[in-house]
Image (cartoon, rainbow, N blue to C red):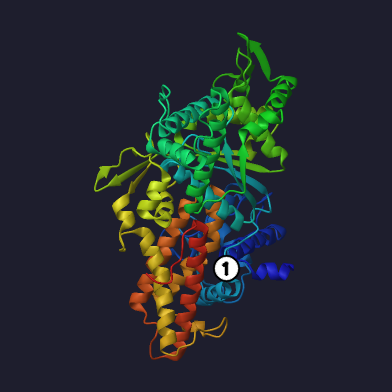
Amino acid sequence: MTAANEKNNLNAKQILLAALAEAVGRAREKGLLQIEQVGEILVQRPSDPTFGDYSTNLAMSLAREAKLPPRKIAEIIIAELQLPENFAEEIAIAGAGFINFRLHPKALWDTVSEIFRLGETFGRSNAGKNEKVLIEYVSANPTGPVAVVQGRAGAIGDVLANLLDWAGYQVQREYYINDALNSLQVQKFAASVEAWYLRKLGQEAELPEDGYQGDYVAHMAEEIAQEAGDRYLNMPPEARREEFVKLSLQRIIAGQRADLEAYGVRFDNWFWESELYKAGAVEQVIERLKELGHTYEADGAVWLKTSEFGHIKDEVLVRSNGLPTYLAADIAYHRNKFERGFDRLIDIWGPDHHGHVTRMKAGVQALGYSADKFEIMLHQIVRLFSGGEMVRMSKRAGDIIPLRDLIDEVGPDAARFFFLMRSADSHLDFDLELAKKESSENPVYYVQYAHARICSIFRSADEHGVILPKPGAANLSLLQHPRELDLIRKLADFPEEIETAAALREPHRMTRYAQEIASMLHLFYTDCRVLGDDPALTQARLALLQATRIVLQNTLGILGISAPESM
C-alpha cells in the first residue's frame, strides 16, 4: 500500500491527529512554538455534542513548555492546520484552550462511501503491528463441566481475541488443562465415576469420601457401562483406576469442548499440563531459576525470591517432599509460551485467583521476561436471577451451575451479550427472564432486531421494485436530516471503538456501541421515511442503511453473536 493510499484510508480522528502533529511541527520550524517535542496528542469526542464532533486539549498540554497561554497556542495551531477540503465545517477555541472541530457533512458522507468500499473489513487496522499475542482463558478444572462463571471468561477472552485480531495483532487462543498437579482431584473424580460404573453393573461400591457429586458423574458412568459393558469389571483395581482416570479426563475434556463450541468459543490449542512434566520443562525451569540466583533452600524446601519482584513474600517452588508446587508448573508453562515465540501473554482468570497475580508476575520476571509483556485480567463473579430470586446450584452438576444449562435456557447469543455488558472487573447479575424476552427491553434482542429491521426494509424495497444502490451510485449529499447525520457519526466511530476496546482490554465497550447503533437506527427509522416518493433520497437512505448493516454485522461478528435477517 502506498503512502497516498494509506492516507486515504485514515478515518476522521486519524486525519485530525496527523494534521495536528504536522501543524505543531510547522509552528516549531517557524519558531512560533519553542518546544522540544510533542507528546501524545489526544483527540476525543466531546461529552457535549454541541461543542462539535472532536476536541483536543493539545494547546493546554503544550502551554508549560511553550511558555504561552493555551488559547494563544491554539490560535497558532489552527493557523498552521492543513486539513482536506470540506473536512471541517467549523474549528473553534473553547474554554481554557480546547480546539473543537465540527466535521463538514461531506466528511460524513465520505464515511458512508468508505464503509461501502471496505465492507466486512471496515474497522480493521494495523495498530497492533502484527505483535504475536497468546490469550489463555477458561481453563476449567478437568473434573466437571464448564461453569457459568467460566462462561463469562469465555466471552471476555473470545471477544478480546477478536478485537485484537481486528486491531492488527496476531492472536492465538489457548485452553490449559491442569491435569498434573491437579491429579489428586482427578483421582477422586475418576474414583467417583468408577464407583458409579460398578453400581451400574450391579456391584457394591462405596463412593469415595469427598468424592464428586452431581448427576453428571453418574451419567458419565452410565455411558461407559453402556459402551464398554463389563470390560473393566474384572480388571485389577489399580489397572481399572488408571483406565478410569484416562476415560474420565477424555470425556470431561470432550464435554467441555462441546459446551464451549455450542457457546461459540473455540481454541487454537488445548495445552496439557502433563506434557510439561513429560518434557522435563518443570524441572528445567526450577534449575534455571537456581542458576539465575533467584532461589534458596529453607526448611527442606526450595523457595523463589518473589519478594524481590514485588510480591509480598517469597514462595515455595519445591516442597520439602520433593514435589514441585503449582507455581513452579505455572512458571514453566508461561516460559513455554514465550519460547513458542509470542511477544505478549494475556491470561484471563477468575476472581479466586487474585492472590496468584503478583507471584506469577514475579516468576516471569525472575526468568528475565518483561512484566509489561505478561498481562493478567481478573473477571468477577456472576449471579443468576430468575423472577427476582437468585438461582442456586445445579443438582445435575453438584455445587456449580453449568454453562450448558444457561445456553439451553437463554441461548448462546443472549449468554454472550449479557456477560459482556459490564466490564470484567465488575460483578454481574444476570437476569434470566430479561435475557429471554423478545422485546426492546432485552438489549441483545434490541440490537439483533435493528439488523433484522434493515433486512426487512431491503425486502420491502425489492417487493416494490426498488433496487439497492451500488457503492458510489447514491447522491449522499441528500442526507441532511439530523437523525441521518447522527447515525453516520456513530458509524464513523467503529474503527476507533475497536482500537480503544482492544488497547484497554475492554470488550464490554462493543455491546454498548452495538446498542448505540441500534438506538440511532431506530430513531432514524422513526423520523426518516426510507421508501418515499423521492427516488434519489430513497437511494441515499438505502445506502445509509446498507452501511449501517455492514457495521452492525461487523460488530455482532466481533461479539460472536448472530445477525438475523428476520425476527
Residue at 58% x, 48% y is 267
Say which of 532 and 286 sits in front: 286
Residue tagged 1: 120
Q: In the shown orientation, is residue 4 left or right of residue 348?
A: right
Image height check: is 146 above or below 562? above
Q: In the shown orientation, is residue 511 left or right of residue 302?
A: left
Say which of 406 and 87 sits in front: 406
Q: Position of residue 395 (x, y in %)?
A: 33, 38
Count residues near mark 1 (Cα–Cα under 10 Å), then give few for <14, some for 14-19, many for 20+: some
Q: In the shown orientation, is residue 416 left or right of residue 527?
A: right
Type of the residue with mark 1: Glu
Within the image, what quadrant is residue 168 found in?
bottom right
Please identify the quadrant where the C terminus is shown.
bottom left
Residue 392 seen in the current view: yes
Q: Position of residue 212 (x, y in %)?
A: 42, 30
Please identify the quadrant where the N terminus is shown.
bottom right
Q: Position of residue 26 (x, y in %)?
A: 69, 62
Q: Position of residue 118 (x, y in %)?
A: 60, 71
Within the image, what quadrant is residue 279 found in?
top right
Image height check: is 146 above or below 552? above
Say which of 67 and 299 sits in front: 299
Say which of 323 and 445 sits in front: 323
Q: In the shown orientation, is residue 336 left or right of residue 44?
A: right
